[in-house]
């Protein structure tokens, strides 16, 4: 994972097994939090040449964390996962841009989501760019990749989730429709097409964000953050 923030979160998540820093940069104040976290977690830190760091990523800013791969979750895990009573799951239906995936994961993790669900095909993979855009959130958030979003939503329903889709054509806004109690899965579609038809039909409810300015919409990650903080979290216990 390249960059200070992503490397720091890799260490905090327990996934990093070594941190590489640019030669001569250990005394830099910007690295203090990273070096302290690495010392606390007993993660070795090694100085490396710019050429070696460039071999991992071009935009490393002098820091690269080497991480262990996590076991990927799948559709079956949705039925057996030990969800709590008021957990939130975020489902991304066709987000293809790694930056948008990372930003959406960041919003989901910050809001306390228990899991992220994405497609296997025609969707962004978890790349170093996505992890960096997530500020390391993708290293903390359980992530299930599924072949069929509609079937995954049925699995979540069987697990006690109410499924709410964010759809600009919905009749009610997030301020006009109450958030369902208990477990909630929030579904966000792609920026170009929104929710797929079958995904929309699988939702228990549809809501939209009120757009009061001149722009017609927000990007997917910004929309997700808005619906989580304006619609879902206010219904939860603080």
Image: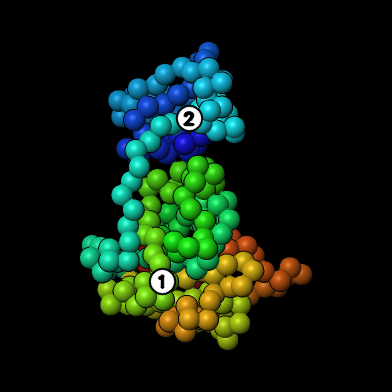
Instruction: Look at 34% across and 77% down and name the residue there.
Output: 154
Q: Quadrant of residue 83?
A: bottom left
Q: Which residue is mark 2?
A: 64
Q: Position of residue 234 (x, y in %)?
A: 44, 68
Say what secondary structure mark 2 lies in: strand
User: Which tag is nearer the camera, tag 2 or tag 1?
Assistant: 1
User: In which quarter of the view is residue 214 placed?
Assistant: bottom right
Q: Looking at the picture, how far across and down is residue 129, in whole percent?
A: 54, 44
Q: CA distance from mark 2 to mark 1?
A: 34 Å
SS at badge 1: loop
- Circle 2 packing at 10 Å, graded few (<14), some (14-19), many (20+), is many
**Would you say 220 lies left or right of 20 here?**
right
Residue at image point 50% right, 42% down: 128
Question: Does residue 63 appear anywhere in the picture?
Answer: yes
**Horizontally, is 103 left or right of 84 in the view?**
right
Upstream in sequence: badge 2 or badge 1: 2
Q: Nearer the viewer, residue 61 or 233?
A: 61
In the picture shown, does residue 192 fall above or below 31?
below
Instruction: Count numbered badges in the picture.
Output: 2
On the rendered image, what quadrant is the C terminus found in? bottom left
Q: Is residue 97 above or below residue 31?
A: below
Label 1 neighbour load within 10 Å: few <14, some 14-19, many 20+? some
Residue at the far top in the pictured view: 24
Determine whether, in the image, residue 152 is placed left or right of residue 167: left
176 vs 84: above or below: below
Residue at 61% across / 72% down in the picture?
193
Q: Locate residue 94, reporting x and y percent.
A: 53, 66
**Could you say where residue 35 lies in the image, as x and y percent from the top left?**
42, 24
Q: Which residue is mark 1?
A: 148
């Amino acid at each position: 994972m390249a960059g200070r923030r992503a490397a720091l979160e890799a260490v905090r998540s327990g996934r990093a097994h070594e941190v590489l820093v640019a030669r001569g940069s250990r005394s830099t104040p910007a690295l203090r939090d990273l070096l302290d976290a690495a010392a606390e977690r007993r993660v070795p830190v090694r100085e490396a040449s710019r050429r070696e760091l460039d071999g991992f990523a071009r935009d490393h800013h002098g820091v690269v964390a080497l991480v262990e791969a996590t076991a990927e979750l799948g559709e079956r895990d949705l039925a057996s996962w030990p969800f709590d009573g008021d957990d939130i799951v975020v489902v991304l239906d066709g987000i293809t841009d790694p930056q948008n995936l990372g930003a959406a994961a960041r919003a989901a993790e910050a809001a306390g989501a228990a899991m992220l669900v994405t497609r296997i095909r025609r969707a962004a993979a978890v790349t170093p760019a996505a992890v960096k855009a997530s500020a390391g959130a993708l290293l903390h958030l359980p992530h299930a990749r599924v072949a069929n979003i509609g079937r995954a939503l049925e699995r979540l329903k069987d697990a006690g989730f109410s499924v709410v889709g964010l759809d600009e054509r919905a009749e009610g806004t997030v301020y006009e429709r109450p958030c369902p109690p208990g477990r909630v899965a929030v579904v966000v579609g792609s920026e170009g097409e929104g929710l797929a038809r079958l995904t929309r039909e699988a939702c228990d409810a549809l809501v939209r964000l009120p757009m009061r300015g001149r722009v017609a919409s927000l990007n997917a990650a910004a929309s997700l953050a808005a619906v989580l903080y304006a619609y879902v979290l206010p219904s939860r216990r603080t």
